[in-house]
Image: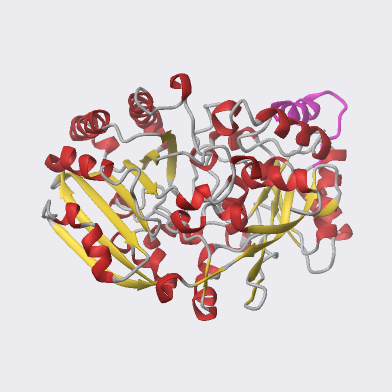
Amino acid sequence: MHQTVLGFLALCALPGIRCLTGPQIAIHFEKTLSPASRVHLPTDPNYSNETIQRWNIFNPPTYIVSVQPALDTDVQEVISYSHANSIPFLGTGGGHGYSTTLSALQNGIEMDLGLFNTSSIDTVANTMTVGGSVIFSDVFSALQEAGKELREGALSSSATWVYLHRQAATGCSCVGIVGATLGGGIGYYSGLHGLISDSLHSVRMVTGTGELLTASATSNADLFWGIKGAGFNYGVVTEATYRVYNHTNGGEAMSADMMFPATFNGSIWETVKGFVGKQPKALSLNVAIGFEPTIGLRIIVNALYVGPLDAGKALIKPFLDLQPMNLNISTLSYAEISDNAIYGLVARGCIRGVNYTSFGINLYDVDVATLVEVVNYMNTSMSANPVLGISEFTSAQFAPYGFELYADDTSAYPYRNTVVYSRIDGSFLSAADAPVVETFASNLRKLLQTTAGAPNGALQVYVHYAKGDEGPEAWYTAEKLPRLQQLKAKHDPAELFGFYNAVP
């Protein structure tokens, strides 16, 4: 990855070497791509409106030209031209990738998949097909109307306090479906249906060698295995087809938002721990902890139960018995969940342009003492330093049922036994505040690691929650890396796809 970037920049610095400029590259693509394709320069007046802009603006990759291919053959041309001229490139869909590894790409080509934006549902075959840039909110209503469902989005990245203080954050409804799939994909319905990649039926893609192919359980099956958990290492997926499911509970779910003061810290974690090993498959638990200057640290618990309202209330009685300071229980349709769960704050967070850094870690137990210490550390640190005031800690806990429907060797995704997917979401108004926020988040991650329960105390993290400093074994495990590396040598030998938590 770094060799590709440095090679390009070093080439431009050599005497007598003519380096391609953005306008020159644009002229080439305007001549060679199909008529429906589009080419944009960062200096274009409507550049920010015509291309998919990044949600996270901290340490971003940079581009000298953005290309929107319209056909698979256009994607092949962009890959071929970029490789031949040693110009780094990045395929983008929803624009939500935030790993620090992406910042290694500078002065490259953006391959914006915005024109691969169609979706269709086959109610007879129980499948849904989407283009490479389709986001979750594009399909929720159509699935609802068809009486179908796919794994839903869950709480993501500073969706509450960042919005309240800055009006910029993110929610899973505006995340690209394909992008989420390539790393596994977790969310509210994971306890029922597993990872979104578990529902993947097939993909059409262009690999690092420029080959256009279909990958499925019966065609290029080994590559299909790798796509489900590490797919961004091998090429550009222009279309994906998923299995969809008939509505659970008639397409309705109970959403319970509960807010507690920080003094309930220990009781909340004891209650959360009580669900480990016996959490119903239709129940997901999300916790979000953040700071508000006027009232201090607050803990939000969201319980989403895909079942009858009364049954859901009975399940969460241990939380209700704690008498939350604020309570909102409602019945939501499948299509309404992402816009309304967690006090509706997740949906408001799709505004782009936030400085953000994430430190994720998988937990294999709910260690109450450690989590109490985490919250106490947050309370002390955030009370003392306003710069930390728009960061938060989030956790998502799902029943193992959905994950256990598929054997570990059915995909590259390595962490089906995770009990809690946790993250410290560091957000800040100015890039100058990054060192303070990152030190705070790193300290919390280290504290969580002491009792996370991974083998030999190792740091393990869901690849889409990764900071980028953990390394390939933390993202993919030592057991699965060799097979992933073999696929890399076959389908991307030049390591063109090496900017996002890459397989080495």
Q: Give yes or no for residue 19 being in the magenta stretch.
A: yes
Q: Is residue 351 visible?
A: no
User: Can you tell which quarter of the image residue 191 is in?
Assistant: bottom left
Q: Is 213 above or below relative to 70?
A: above
Q: Give yes or no for residue 342 being in the magenta stretch.
A: no
x%, y% of residue 135? Answer: 56, 62
Q: Is 23 above or below relative to 88?
A: below
x%, y% of residue 444? Answer: 33, 29
Q: Is residue 7 visible?
A: yes
Quarter the C terminus occupies: top right
Q: Which residue is located at x 88 percent, y 26 percent?
A: 16
x%, y% of residue 283? Answer: 35, 57
x%, y% of residue 389? Answer: 26, 40
The answer to whether 325 appears left or right of 399 in the picture is left
Q: Give 135 or 402, whichever is nearer the viewer.
A: 402
Q: Is 228 above or below relative to 248?
A: above
The answer to whether 299 appears left or right of 279 in the picture is left
Q: Give 198 or 114, whichever is nearer the viewer.
A: 198
Farthest residue to the top: give it.
456
User: Can you tell which quarter of the image residue 441 is in?
Assistant: top left
Q: Which residue is located at x 12 percent, y 54 percent?
A: 321
Q: Which residues are magenta?
A: 1-20
Q: Is 334 above or below relative to 161?
A: below
Q: Which residue is located at x 44 percent, y 47 percent?
A: 400
Quarter the N terminus occupies: top right
The colour scheme of the drawn protein is: secondary structure
- Report the label total: 0
Farthest residue to the bottom: give it.
145
Type of secondary structure dominating the magenta stretch: helix
Q: Which residue is located at x 81 percent, y 49 percent?
A: 220
